[in-house]
Amino acid sequence: MNITSVQLAASSPPASPQVSAQEADQRRQLLQAAKSVNESGVLGQNQLEFLLDRQTHRAVIRVVDRTTQQVVSQIPPEYVLRLAQDLGSSAEVMASEDDT
């Protein structure tokens, strides 16, 4: 049974935020928990994946069908990630306008 490591989603290059030792330890624990869930078979032919969205830097949890590799479920949904991205872009534009 596979466990997907923390991956970066989307097509833009990562911004490479610094990760604290505590956050790195939490990520390792999260990956170990996902590996245990996947090995237990409780999800049947599905597997649990944890990702980090490149654009919003938000954690994403997916349940993926192992045979088809299709996403069965995702938290937060893709539209929420894009909304957060759009709101973040709007806030940056407004902040830069305030500086002028």
Image: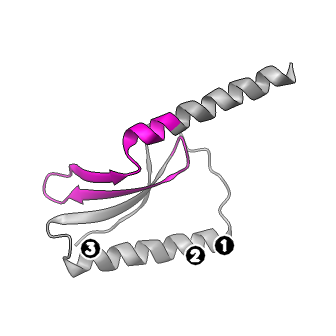
Which residue is disc 1 drawn over?
21
Q: In this view, does 5 lie above or below 69?
A: below
Count of marks placed on residues:
3
x, y (%) of residue 85? 54, 36
Which residue is disc 3 drawn over?
38
Disc 2 and disc 1: Cα gap in Å? 6 Å
Contact check, label 3 and label 2, Cβ < 8 Å: no
x, y (%) of residue 11? 44, 37
Q: Quadrant of the C terminus?
A: top right
The mark that comes first in sequence, 3 or 2, is: 2
Q: Callout 1 environment at 10 Å: few (<14), some (14 to 19), or many (20+)?
A: few
Disc 3 and disc 1: Cα gap in Å? 26 Å
**Residue 25 disc label:** 2
Residue drawn where x is 78% and y is 20% of the image: 97
Mark yes or no: residue 1 visible: yes
Residue drawn where x is 14% and y is 51% of the image: 68
Contact check, label 2 and label 1, Cβ < 8 Å: yes
Query: Is 8 in front, or is 94?
Result: 94
Tell me if residue 55 is in the magenta stretch: yes
Mark yes or no: residue 12 visible: no
Disc 3 and disc 2: Cα gap in Å? 20 Å
Q: In which quarter of the image is the N terminus?
A: bottom left
Tell me if residue 93 is in the magenta stretch: no
x, y (%) of residue 75? 38, 53
Which secondary structure, mark 3? helix
Q: In which quarter of the image is residue 36?
A: bottom left
Q: Which span of residues is magenta-colored?
A: 54-83
